Amino acid sequence: MITFGLLGWPITHSRSPQIHSLALKLAGLQGAYELFPIEPERKAELAAMMKKVREGQITGLNVTIPYKQEVMPFLDALSPNAKNIGAVNTITFKNGKVTGHNTDAPGFEADLANNGLELSYKPGEAVVFGAGGAARAVFYAFLNNGWQIHAFVRNVEKSKQVVADLRGKGLPGGIKLYGLADLSHTLKRNKIDVIVDTTPLGMAPHIDSSSWPSNVKFPGNCLVYDLVYNPENTLLMKQATAAGLRASNGWGMLVEQALLSFEIWTNVKINRADFNAAWQHTTHTP
Ligand code: NAP
């Protein structure tokens, strides 16, 4: 019996148990995916949880906010992705070693490809809103493929460290940080291929908010990608489609990062078309 799980807080709303249960079924494996909520005030319990991984009681662990960095001291090794991003979302115990991986960046990259944008095909330019935890993985995916990023944040001072950390990795792309007021000016000077929103705007309780100011014209012929996936059609996506652009929510990224974690734990690659078809035919509790 395989036991996987998700460590974080709050996680009761997580879709990961449903995604991984379906992956187990498609792979023909017996197992369960459990939630391991640890309130920030009880974070001393992280050590006991990591001991369970080391003892083989948990085969694989996903990690979400607020522990993507906090788990790192408990690990024996980091994958190159996790090391460069500075965050871990997947933990595995193999050959006596507890290793941290990051599947958010390849999950994001895979879902851009699902939307017709192969980052490795040709470097281009991206506008990214936000510079929090999820943005780190998004930045890495672009930088690692030689892209130029224009990152827009509400608090430039606070975000300088994230950008400095990534610049120090020697990745082929480049990143510039701006305040939100610089958007129009930047759009006039650069040819943007993709716009990515990594902020929680568009998600409850901010469903009537969007990072894109209503008085700014979108660049022509670019993809708009919102990491939010609930609601399915966010205000940013509505604005983009009204301007004649392609738009996607972040559901595909969530599925891709989950199935990449599943592959690390089980060595089984789930066929994405089979997964999507089976997901459509499964009843999911909200
Ligand atoms: P986070 O670490 O809290 O970062 C949020 C970022 O958004 C920060 O840069 C924050 O700026 C900014 N922000 C927050 N509220 C804002 C506002 N009202 N106006 C402008 N900027 C604002 O959160 P996260 O873990 O990166 O998650 C961000 C979003 O991505 C969430 O909606 C999450 O559900 C989604 N997500 C999706 C996936 C997926 O697989 N699709 C994966 C991870 C996350 P400050 O630093 O100034 O607060």
Image: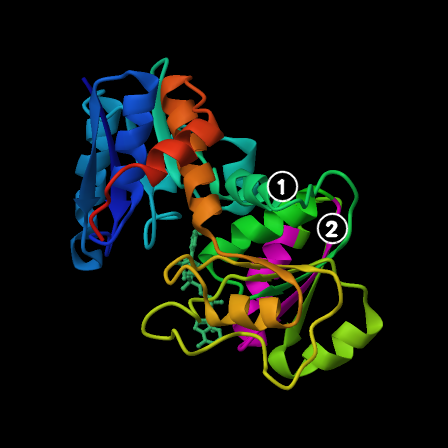
Residue 140 is one of the magenta-drawn residues: no
Residues shaded magenta: 146-166
Label 1 vs 2, first from the N-terminus: 1
Tag 1: amino acid: Ala
Residue 113 badge: 1
Residue under the point 38% across and 47% down = 68
- The residue sitting at the right extreme is 189
Q: CA distance from mark 1 to mark 2?
A: 15 Å
Residue 147 badge: 2
Residue under the point 51% across and 40% down = 107
Residue 153 is one of the magenta-drawn residues: yes
Residue 237, percent from left and from top: 53, 66
- The residue sitting at the front extreme is 281
Tag 2: amino acid: Trp
- The residue sitting at the top extreme is 95
Specify whether 179 is left or right of 285: right
> Above or below — where is 144 with respect to 31?
below
Residue 74, percent from left and from top: 33, 36
Would residue 74 be seen by someone viewing this image from the given angle?
no
Ligand 1 within 8 Å of disc 2? The answer is no
Q: Nearer the viewer, residue 40 or 9?
A: 9
Label 1 with label 2: CB-CB less than 8 Å: no
Residue 106, percent from left and from top: 55, 38
Dot 1: what SS? Answer: helix
Viewer-side label of 1, 2: 1
Tell me the quarter of the picture where residue 211 sits: bottom right
Residue 265, percent from left and from top: 36, 23
Residue under the point 35% across and 26% down = 92
Tell me the quarter of the picture where residue 21 sits: top left
Dot 2: what SS? Answer: loop
> Above or below — where is 279 with respect to 195?
above
Callout 2 environment at 10 Å: few (<14), some (14 to 19), or many (20+)?
A: many
